[in-house]
Amino acid sequence: MELDKYISDLLYRYDCVILPNLGAFIANRVATQIIESEGKIIPPRKEIIFNRHIKNNDGLLHHYIMNAKKISYKKAEELVSSEINRISQILEKGETVTFNNLGTIRKVDENNIEFTIDSSVNYLKSSYGLSTINAATVSSKQENSADKKQVLPISQSEPKGKLNFSSKITRYAAVAIPLLTLASLAYYHQLNEFNLNLNSAEISIISSEKKEIKKVEAAKEIKAEEITVEEITPVAEEKVVEERVKVNKVFNYHLVAGAFSSNKNAQKAIRKINSKGLEAEIIGQNKNGLYMVTYSSHQTISEAKEELGLVKIIDENNSAWIWKKSIEKQVIE
């Protein structure tokens, strides 16, 4: 019997699965990561580690196998023990043991076991369907768009967002010379058409005002361009959220924790159940008007039966039962 599947199934629901007398697979929650050097955005996930010091049996794995295979607890315990003995013998030989979708373990010395994670599977349910985003791709598309703006080089010796003095002189000279030429032509044209007698001082004032306007516009343009570049990364994070959509699905089997005549009592039961790490909810009322508090809903009877054994253990509720009723619920994918 291979333990891989059962351990993987449990890690989607729990953060620790113990292999008695061998160690435990522990799931640590990791928040969204932005790796700027590689241009990647990694969604939140459960990162698996192996701790050889946690060896005491908590019964979780045995009960899960017992319900999944429809066998007694003692038989499940024997199967797990036999498999762990086989793994231990392989490790003693210095060989590597592979757990599908989890990683590999090997014995380094008498006191240490080395674990190499298989990061291809994300055990965090809320991140289902999300994959690593290549932020460099988003940035490249932004830069190659038709309305791309060219950012002027910034001197390394001066604060960000300011041009050095020589750069200012070059830019303003490039703007001022054509303006002076246009102003002179306008003056000549107006003199002939309206016989205006403008002196050189007036031309100088007009030209100077136009130069100052261009200076202000150039400074605004530089500032706007810098803001555009800095905001490229947040665009990628918004896309991660937009990819998650809500869909309607029909669930036919529901694990019932209890039925209550008042909504107040039903809510009280939900708070008590959720304090144990479960996610109970009211899914409606039955034909007698009782509020149905459920642990979870499933599309197939096999999934419901598999989960029923676990919630009975966690909530210590031997009266939990499966209610068959087609109910449409909105879920995130």
Image: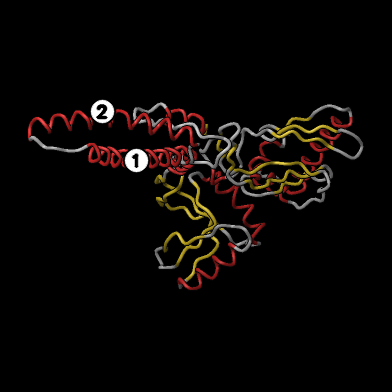
Q: Residues within 10 Å of mark 1 (few under 14, many from 20)?
A: few
Dividing the picture into quarters, in which one does residue 81 lie? top right
Q: How many marks?
A: 2
Q: For the view shown, which residue lies furthest in the right direction?
A: 110
Q: Residues within 10 Å of mark 2 (few under 14, many from 20)?
A: few
Above or below: residue 26 compared with residue 293: above
Dividing the picture into quarters, in which one does residue 6 lie? top right
Q: What amino acid type is highlighted by mark number 2?
A: Thr
The residue mark sitting in front, 2 or 1, is 2
Q: Which numbered tag is attached to residue 217?
A: 1
Spot occupied by residue 16 in the image (x, y as percentages of width and height) = 71, 48
Describe residue 179's horizontal placement relative to residue 152 as left or right.
left
Which residue is at 41% across, 52% downward?
Answer: 327
Spot occupied by residue 279 in the image (x, y as percentages of width and height) = 55, 57
Spot occupied by residue 306 in the image (x, y as percentages of width and height) = 60, 47
Which residue occupies the foreground of this view, 115 or 40? 40
Marks 2,1: beta carbons within 8 A: no
In the rendered view of the protein, which quadrant contains the N terminus?
A: top right
Describe residue 297's horizontal placement relative to residue 47 as left or right.
left
Q: What amino acid type is highlighted by mark number 1?
A: Glu
Q: CA distance from mark 2 to mark 1?
A: 20 Å
Q: Which numbered tag is attached to residue 181?
A: 2
Which residue is at 81% across, 34% downward?
Answer: 87
Which residue is at 22% across, 30% downward?
Answer: 184
